[in-house]
Image: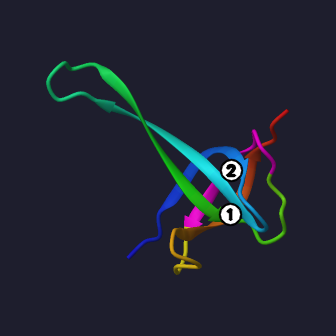
């Protein structure tokens, strides 16, 4: 089974070696037929504490590291301010 890759923006550094990533996707509403933004937050393991708030990162699915953390930082696509 292929591993999922998510791309999102770092909104918070949550403790040591953990970042909070907000993933936005656009979905067609079934009744109103308009594009709607949907958001989800993921906890991502950042081994070397490389990412900062505002960075756009990609993360890959991994075995569960803790109760809510099952993604690992793959690379930083764009640096924030």
Q: Name the quadrant of the C terminus.
A: top right
Query: Is the Cβ of the residue at disc 2 closer than 8 Å to that at disc 1?
Result: yes
Q: Residue at x 69, y 46 (%)?
A: 10
Name the side, left or right, on which 56 lies relative to 39. Answer: right
Name the side, left or right, on which 2 lies relative to 50. Answer: left
Name the side, left or right, on which 46 lies relative to 1. Answer: right
Point out residue 79 in the picture as x, y percentages from the top left corner. 81, 41
Per the image, the residue denoted by label 2 is 57
Q: Residue at x 47, y 63 (%)?
A: 4
Point out residue 67 in the picture as x, y percentages from the top left corner. 51, 75
Looking at the image, is mark 2 or mark 1 earlier in the sequence? 2
Q: Secondary structure at mark 1?
A: strand
Point out residue 41 in the picture as x, y percentages from the top left corner. 52, 49
Per the image, the residue denoted by label 1 is 74
Decide whether residue 37 is among the magenta residues: no
Instruction: Determine whether 48 is above or below 29 in the image.
Output: below
Instruction: Determine whether 79 is above or below 17 in the image.
Output: above
Point out residue 70 in the picture as x, y percentages from the top left corner. 54, 71
Crowd class of label 2 (few under 14; some 14 to 19; many from 20; radius 10 Å): many
Q: Residue at x 71, y 58 (%)?
A: 14
Instruction: Determine whether 16 is above or below 34 in the image.
Output: below
Q: Secondary structure at mark 2?
A: strand
Q: Nearer the viewer, residue 54 or 68?
A: 68
Crowd class of label 1 (few under 14; some 14 to 19; many from 20; radius 10 Å): some
Q: Which residues are magenta?
A: 52-60
Instruction: Determine whether 27 is above or below 75 in the image.
Output: above
Q: Nearer the viewer, residue 32 or 15?
A: 15
């Amino acid at each position: 089974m292929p591993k999922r890759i998510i791309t999102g923006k770092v909104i918070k550094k949550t403790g040591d070696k953990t970042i909070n990533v907000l993933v936005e996707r656009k979905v067609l509403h079934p009744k109103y037929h308009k594009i709607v933004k949907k958001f989800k937050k993921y906890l991502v393991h950042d081994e070397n504490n490389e990412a900062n708030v505002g960075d756009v990162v990609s993360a890959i699915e991994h075995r569960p590291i803790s109760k809510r953390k099952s993604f690992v930082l793959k690379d930083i696509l764009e640096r924030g301010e």
